[in-house]
Image (cartoon, rainbow, N blue to C red):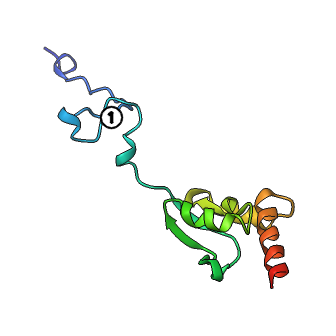
Amino acid sequence: MSDKQTAKKAPETTTEPTKLANGANGYTGAEKPATATTKPETVVYIGPNILSEGLKKNTVYRGRPTELIEAIAEKHPGIIRLFVKVDKLSKAMAEVHKTGTPLNLAYTNIIKRMEVSE
């Protein structure tokens, strides 16, 4: 026999996760992992400092701080836009400084409301 005939065929690669018995690797049979095993998204607040409300620019949060946002949203509508995912941070920072973008409008509206309330 020649070397070509005895050489083993390389295993095919696949994008499907390896299935271990009893879901040992978190595989549940669904395409996406179960919600309980997913990491909470990391977000950064890129709005102005509102220290009276506990908000400081560039603060990183593990998971979206929904309770904090709900408490502040009455005074500052649109503040939720200023909590951005870390992977979109550089683009969002550029949009905050670009006049007319939704992030810029949210940022400037908060500044205006803070000036009026002072």
Direction from residue 60 to residue 31 in the image, left or right: left
Horizontal arrangement in the rendering, residue 40 relative to residue 18 (left or right): right
Locate the C terminus by quadrant. Answer: bottom right
Identify the residue at horizontal 77%, vertical 63% (top origin): 106
Residue 19 percent coordinates (x, y): 25, 32
User: Whole-percent x and y of residue 101?
Assistant: 81, 58
Q: Is residue 33 above or below residue 105?
A: above
- Position of the N terminus by quadrant: top left
- Of residues 20 and 69, the one nearer the viewer is 69
Give the residue at x 37% y 40%.
Answer: 34
Residue 26 placement: quadrant: top left
Quick one: SS at disc 1?
A: loop
Q: Residue type at mark 1: give it.
A: Pro
Q: Position of residue 29 (x, y in %)?
A: 32, 29
Q: Residue at x 62, y 57 (%)?
A: 88
Q: Is residue 93 above or below residue 113?
A: above
Q: Residue at x 51, y 67 (%)?
A: 61
Residue at numbered disc 1 = 17
Residue sitting nearer the eye, 12 or 27: 27
In the rendering, at what x and y percent does residue 91 appear? Answer: 68, 59
Q: Quadrant of residue 13?
A: top left
Numbered marks: total: 1
